[in-house]
Image (spheres, grey):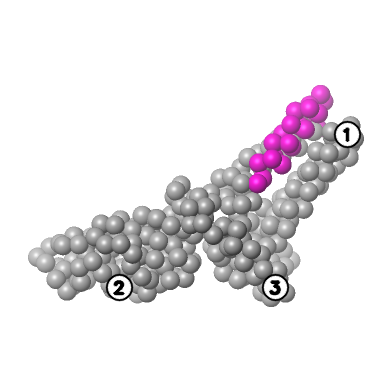
Amino acid sequence: MVRQTIARLEKSSALDSVSDRLQGAVESAAKPQGLRDLLHGTWLGHPLHPVLVQVPVGAFSSAAVLDVLPGQRRAATMLIAVGVASTGPAIAAGLVDWASLAKDQRRVGLVHAAANTVALGLYAGSLAARWTGRWGLGRFLAYAGLSVAGAGAYLGGHLSYKQGAGVNVASGELVSMPDGWTELGSVAALPEGRPVVREVEGVRVLLYRQGEEVTAMVEQCGHQGGPLGDGKVEGSGADACVVCPWHGSTFRLVDGTVKHGPAAGDQPLLRTRVEAGKVAVSPR
């Protein structure tokens, strides 16, 4: 029943009008590249949103335990206050990540965000009730908030583990490649300073040559699978980067380091070797 409901949610075009307007608003608010990179977690090498949610989740869960223990009203109230106050950065990071997702992912993410917004409202109400001495109401609203937040967390898990949001989709390409070395032709045939695409057992590989040195990375962008081979190149030499044509994730060609999001992790690299003027690659 739950799976069927989520499947319908993924296909619910009725959510798209709200989703599209919110996406535009988020993109306008987070227009500076530095702000987007900060919130995506590009500097961290990992999406920032899952890290930030640990503070409110931990605070709310701990408060739920303390609420059933005698003499812990003040401590539970303090934890709920910490949880409410710490949601801001987590919300900001989550919205920026959400705005760069595919339409079906954004539908689920929209309901995930709505559930968490309701949960936050319930916790804010619990805090207000506690501050005015209505402890019973405060506890009720807190447990209601925890229940709604649990439903939101379920949707967040579905978004990540079922729909692949925030997952480096390029990593799976390395696993599907055959072990051992695969020769891809002569180094001299590769244009210097300009990436080219080759295939290894159906997996597209982006090669970049500097002199006799060749770097190879998975051509499918780790963020949402965009074709890096169709992206523009910015910079030159060791600082040259390829920009994904879909969402603008930017990776340094010599080592796959992510320079700008929405990708948060580096682009997976293959091992390379050059022998007798021939370049070969291996996934492991």
Query: Which residue is at the front of the view, 245 or 172?
Result: 245
On the question of residue 41 being in view, the answer is yes
Quadrant that contains the C terminus: bottom left
**Amino acid tagged 1:** Thr
Task: Mark 1 and mark 3 in contact? Answer it, CB < 8 Å.
Answer: no
Circle 3 crowding by C-alpha within 10 Å: few under 14, some 14–19, many from 20? few
* Of pointers 1 and 2, the one earlier in the residue sequence: 1
Task: Tell me the residue that label 1 is attached to.
Answer: 132
Which range is magenta?
A: 68-88
Q: According to the image, label 3 marks what residue?
A: 17
- The image shows residue 45 at horizontal and vertical percentages of 44, 50
- In this view, the residue in front, 204 or 32, is 32
Q: Residue 273, percent across and down?
A: 19, 60
Q: Which residue is located at x 77 percent, y 53 percent?
A: 118
Tell me which label, 1 or 3, sits earlier in the chain: 3
User: Residue 65, position in %: x, y?
Assistant: 75, 34
Distance between mark 1 and mark 2 Cα atoms: 66 Å
Disc 3 and disc 2 in contact, CB within 8 angstroms? no
- Amino acid at circle 3: Ser
Overall secondary structure of the magenta section: helix
In the picture, the quarter occupied by the N terminus is bottom right
Looking at the rendered structure, the secondary structure element under dot 1 is loop
The answer to which quarter of the image holds residue 186 is bottom left
The image quarter containing residue 198 is bottom left
Work out whether 186 lies above or below 172. below
Q: Looking at this rendering, what residue extends furthest in the top direction?
A: 71
- The residue under label 2 is 197
Q: Nearer the viewer, residue 183 or 48?
A: 48
Q: Is residue 32 above or below residue 87?
A: below
Helix, strand or loop status at disc 2: strand
The image quadrant that residue 208 belongs to is bottom left
